[in-house]
Structure formats: structure tokens, C-alpha cells
Amino acid sequence: MKRSAVYPGSFDPITNGHIYITERAAAIFDEVRVSILVNAQKRATFSVDERCAMAREALSHLPNVKVEYFEGLLVDYVRQAHSRVIIRGLRAMSDFEYEFQMALMNRQLAPEIETFFIVTDPKYSYISSSGVREIFQFGGTVQDAVPPGALRRLRERFPGQTASDTQEALVPATEHGCARLSPALRGPEGRAALSRSGRPDGPAQ
Ligand code: ADP
């Protein structure tokens, strides 16, 4: 019998951490189904089609991996997929508590289904989809955190927010009495302005 495992998640967007977990799972199971959860309650940044496309592209080097999506209860989907294994990734102790509770709830619902945890590589332990979205929107670099296809879609979704072309401007006065650095004037000019503002962490004069 084919040993099949389901790796569920939001994958909004897929990150290098997700890819790592999928690769580890694909080396052990005959088939891994990366399953994108469609949650009507949670507003995703990318549509299901976009998330599927990004995941398919990023995982195309793994012939025994399929990308799908599902709605409703995970255990129902796992049963439908004729699998008995749920894969989840662990980054830190902070993931553990939530994952442990989910695993117990799923066992309560479907005692025949087992949750397998795969520990991430330390170099991916800081990566999360929400972190990637947030950093990208504020002009930070995420190219070490996501595959090229996801970076491309982030650029399309948030045009003008790439680290290389984002500049910041010092908006001198605010009602709080401190200077504010906003996207439009980063670089030597902005930094000089910052140091003039007397901010303690500004470069030495
Ligand atoms: P969910 O909303 O279900 O947590 P995610 O897409 O955020 O969906 O994550 C799916 C799974 O991948 C979870 O088990 C999560 O802990 C794991 N995961 C997320 N990021 C990483 C990472 N950087 N390294 C390893 N596992 C990760």
C-alpha cells in the first residue's frame, strides 16, 4: 500500500521553510499532498489559485508531491485522501503548544490518523508567511525566505515595495514631537537627515 501523507497549511505564500519540510517528508513517504486550507473566516493575501500556483512551481522538483486545496475539517480530507498521516513543521517551542493541541484534537476526531512533526532547519526557524508579508510590505528583503515564484507574486501584489527600490523619507515634525522615517527617502540623504535629527542610533558625525 502507498504510504501517503498530507501536509496542510495556509501557504500564504509558500516559504523556504515549507519547502524544506515538504522535501523531508517526500524522502520518507511515497506520496506527500501539500494541502492548502481554504478558510472562509481568515482573509488570505493570495487567492487559493495563486497559492497553489506558487506551491506547485516551488515543489516541481519533487515528483511524489501533489498540491491541492481543501475546505472543512482536516481529518475528513485526510480520510478522503486515503491517508493516515498529517505532517506539520516545528520551528520553535512557540509552535509546539498550538501544534500539540491541534494534534490532540485531530486524534480525538480521528484516532486512526497520526500527526508527524518535522523539525525545521535552524536557518529557516525565523521564517513565517505572515513575517514575509509584513517585511515585504515595509520594503525589507525576503529573497532568502521565499522561492522566486513567491517573490514575483509579492512584487505584483505590493508594487513598489521591493527592498532595492524602496526609499525612505524623513518627515520632520509629527504631532508626537519626533521625526518619522517614511518610505521615500532612504539612502545617504535619509540617513544624514536622521543623524541630524539627533536620534541616538544615528551614524556618528
Ligand atoms: P497554518 O496557518 O496552518 O499554520 P502555515 O502555512 O503557516 O499554515 O504553516 C503550515 C505548517 O508549516 C505548520 O505546521 C507550520 O508550523 C509549518 N511551518 C511554517 N513555517 C515553517 C518554517 N519556516 N519551517 C518549518 N515549518 C514551518
Image (cartoon, rainbow, N blue to C red):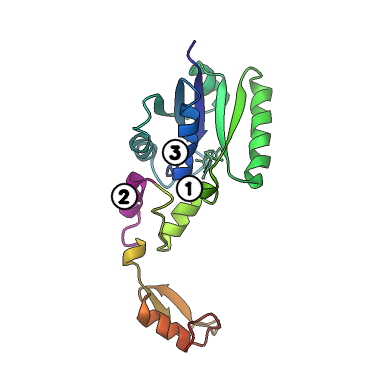
Residue 151 part of the magenta segment: yes
**Looking at the image, which residue is at 30% across and 52% down?**
156
Q: Disc 1 and disc 2: Cα gap in Å? A: 15 Å
**Label 3 or label 1, whichever comes before in sequence order:** 3
Vertical comparison of 55 with 140: above or below: above
Q: Is residue 43 above or below residue 59?
A: below
In the image, the segment drawn in magenta is 147-161
Q: Name the residue beneath numbered marker 3.
A: 19
87 or 79: which is nearer to us?
87
Q: Is residue 118 magenta?
A: no
Mark 3–mark 1 CB contact (< 8 Å): no
The yes-or-no answer for disc 3 within 8 Å of ligand 1 is: no
- The answer for how far apart the CA atoms under marks 3 and 1 are is 12 Å
Identified at 58% across, 44% down, the residue is: 91
**In front: label 3 or label 2:** 3
- Mark 1 belongs to which amino acid? Ser
Residue 84 coordinates in the image, percent (x, y): 56, 19
* Residue holding disc 1: 129
Q: Mark 1 CB in 8 Å range of ligand 1?
A: yes
Relative placement, left or right, of 177 versus 166 is right
Which residue is pictured at 46% across the width and 27% down the height?
26
